[in-house]
Image (cartoon, rainbow, N blue to C red):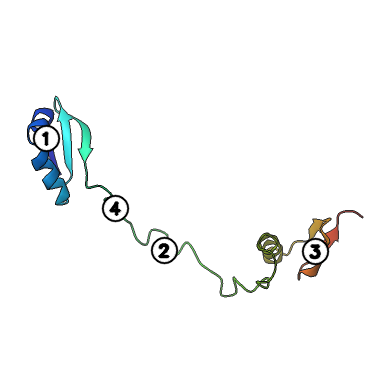
């Protein structure tokens, strides 16, 4: 990464753009202090692969809690209830169709 002062940037802007197109990053400084950075448009941010290695896992049966024909939002609630062995308290009678313990909130 190289530095160019404002005068050089104004005088040689086309040359600086050519360098940027080649992948170079250029800092523009005013009175020796950085004020701007020229980067290739859409340059990808540096990626750090493996930073969560060993911290995340997916259970082998992650998609077997609730059959796929059920409503998506219901699947989330029922799946959470099954995973944590919870009882659902609701007035929605449809949830009684799912394989989870349901308590009727109206009683």
> Where does residue 37 sit, x and y in percent of width and height?
21, 38
Spatial separation of the CA atoms under disc 3 and disc 2: 40 Å
> Where does residue 30 sit, x and y in percent of width and height?
16, 26
Disc 4 element: loop
Residue picked out by circle 1: 4
Q: Earlier in the sequence, mark 4 or mark 2?
A: 4
Q: Label 1 neighbourhood size at 10 Å, few (<14), some (14-19), many (20+)?
A: some
Disc 3 element: helix
The mark closer to the camera, 2 or 1, is 1
Spatial separation of the CA atoms under disc 4 and disc 2: 22 Å
Q: In this rendering, is residue 98 above or below 37?
A: below
Q: Label 4 neighbourhood size at 10 Å, few (<14), some (14-19), many (20+)?
A: few
Specify whether 96 is left or right of 64: right
Residue picked out by circle 2: 53
The mark closer to the camera, 3 or 2, is 3
Spatial separation of the CA atoms under disc 4 and disc 1: 23 Å
Q: Earlier in the sequence, mark 4 or mark 1?
A: 1
Residue picked out by circle 4: 44
Badges 1 and 3: C-beta atoms under 8 Å apart? no
Spatial separation of the CA atoms under disc 2 and disc 1: 40 Å
Q: Earlier in the sequence, mark 2 or mark 1?
A: 1
Residue picked out by circle 3: 94
Disc 2 element: loop
């Amino acid at each position: 990464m190289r530095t160019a002062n404002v005068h050089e940037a104004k005088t040689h802007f086309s040359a600086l753009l050519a360098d940027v197109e080649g992948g170079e990053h250029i800092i523009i400084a005013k009175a020796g202090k950085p004020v701007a950075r020229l980067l290739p448009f859409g340059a990808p941010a540096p990626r750090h692969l493996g930073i969560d290695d060993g911290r995340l896992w997916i259970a082998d049966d992650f998609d077997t809690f609730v059959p796929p024909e059920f409503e998506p939002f219901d699947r989330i609630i029922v799946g959470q209830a099954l995973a944590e062995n919870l009882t659902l308290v609701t007035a929605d009678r449809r949830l009684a169709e799912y394989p989870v313990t349901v308590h009727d909130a109206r009683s």
